[in-house]
Amino acid sequence: MKPLKLIAGAVVMLCALAGCSGEPDSAAPAGEPAPSGPVVSAPVGTLVGRMDGDIRIFKGIPYAQPPVGEARWTPPVTKPDWEGTFDASSFGPACIQPDARLAGIYAADIGEMSEDCLSLNVWAPEDADGAPVLVWIHGGALITGASKEPMYDGKRLAEEGIILVSINYRLGIFGYLAHPELSAESPLGVSGNYGLLDQVEALKWLERNIEAFGGDPENVTIAGESAGALSVMYLMASPLADDLFDKAIAQSAYMITTPELKDLSHGQPSAEQIGMLLAAAIQKPTVAALREMDAQELSAASRQANFAAFANIDGHALERQLVEVFDLGEQAQVPILTGFNSGEIRSLTMLAPTMPEDRGAYEATIRAQYGELADAFLQLYPAELGQDAIYATTRDALYGWTSERMVRQQTEAGHPSYLYIFDHGYPAAEALGLHAFHGSELPYMFGNPRKVGPNWPAIPNTRTEEAISDAMVGYWASFASTGTPKAEDAPDWPAYGNERGYMAFLDDGPQAGTHLMPGMFELHERAVCRRRVQGSQPWNWNAGLWSPPLISGEESGCP
């Protein structure tokens, strides 16, 4: 079978950024000895977890019925309340995904996988009472990852007085396959978006149950990195998530073009067409045949066919393009903390072209593709920077523009919001040319620099690294608590506001500033405006040398 390149494209095709193992979820039979760990009596039922110092930990809690058998590719169904005591001492299995490719820096052994994977985990202070809640959505291109990744251990954040919740959600073909037959099965006439619907279901579970753990259901912050941050934007845009959260954190988010469910849009085929192409590529043209396939074999086949997982605009879970939702002010009206890393593309080089040896050819191509915007482009990304100019172009077109766009629009809507850039490196990363690479902020903001994967550049065990981590933990926990990021022994973080404030996380610690990368946002906003008007181009990573020719401002009506 030849791989089929599906035009949706993989934005962040990482190896697994998360892992999961452990025994399946189970409720202890009646008559068992009294549990020795912490016990919570929630509306859904009684749970017993375990203690780690002063933190109560409950793992593998099912929030929805198993989406298996005929329920494969159906919306999540609320888990009935249980009798007896649920043993929440072990993580649930990871959602089905392609086997990890263990060569890259993001590699991890995620252990057991299953379609019965819709579970969440809770880290709560022992004395929590009305505590703020931070809900973590893992990354991994919506194809890989799990909530059990050691880097995502919530103990350090919980020690700041918040409750950390991490969730699993359906991935890849199981979470995002759209197909005409699936749409025909749906009372709403829609398909795909199952992973997004899982996230909504998890938030509904928390709204009902988190108070029993000492959490405040009226003070919930959703947070994620990479595909997790894309999920945060989907939730901010989805009418199904209205009033389910109060703040948002988006780390390395990318506000890319979203496929329409049924129609060609911005040069991309419909999600249903992509689903039919995928089914044909794996020689299972009907939904019935796809449901009969072994889950792991189906996942592997979808990867071989280059299936890229994205939500789709179905008029139900998502009503329009993310850029349009934010332009119209239809997104969740909440404060946001968002930002990106200076070296994002250094570990995602597949997303960027190579600088030609003839630097004159570079400039000529940019002038041909960008027209009246070429001078501004070449001022930001001059040929003299070599490959660094290419990496910076793709970084800014994906992550920098998205971060500043979100914080600008939330600020304009009256919500104090916060921008950052993570620009910290350390010897093991620098030796690999990975200064501030994609995801490198994660072990710092979780307070887990010793819990990285086997191929992750080792973080030195020094006071300098600890201080950066302590500051990030403090800022993130404070934002989740009050909407204002503050940290002990660290500078005040200015709101974006009129001065375009931001926080830079540098080698010697956090440093506040204003006007990050002047001209960057304006250039990419103008380019995206032209693509939107032209109607036949997506706005993904097709920037710089890979950009199609842009129409002029006069033709488009764009600035």
Image (cartoon, rainbow, N blue to C red):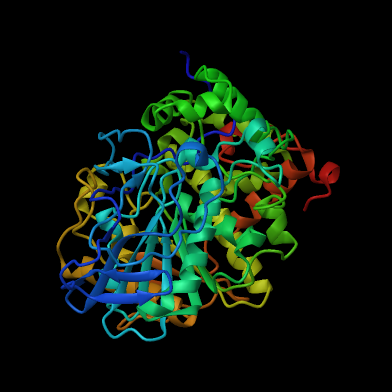
Residue in view at x 60 percent, y 76 percent: 497
Relative to 401, 132 lies left or right: left
List the single residue furthest toward the top.
1
At x 30%, y 35%, the residue is 100
Q: Position of residue 35 (x, y in %)?
A: 18, 71
- At 32% from the left and 33% from the top, the residue drawn is 99
Above or below 133: residue 311: above
- Report whether 75 appears left or right of 137: right
Q: Which sits in the foreground, 507 or 67?
A: 67
Answer above or below: position of 236 versus 435: below
Can you give x and y, in whole percent of width and height, for residue 232 in the image?
A: 53, 59
Determine if residue 309 is in view: no
517 on left or right of 126: right
Image: 466 above or below 191: below
Q: How many marks?
A: 0
Picture quadrant of residue 161: bottom left
Q: Which of the two residues, 189 or 245, is positioned nearer the viewer here? A: 189
Image point (31%, 48%), residue name: 93
Q: x and y percent of residue 529 in the render?
A: 73, 48
Q: Position of residue 401 (x, y in %)?
A: 58, 54
Can residue 428 be seen in the rendering of this structure?
yes
Q: Is residue 188 above or below residue 369?
A: below
Q: Left of 107 or right of it: where is 385? A: right
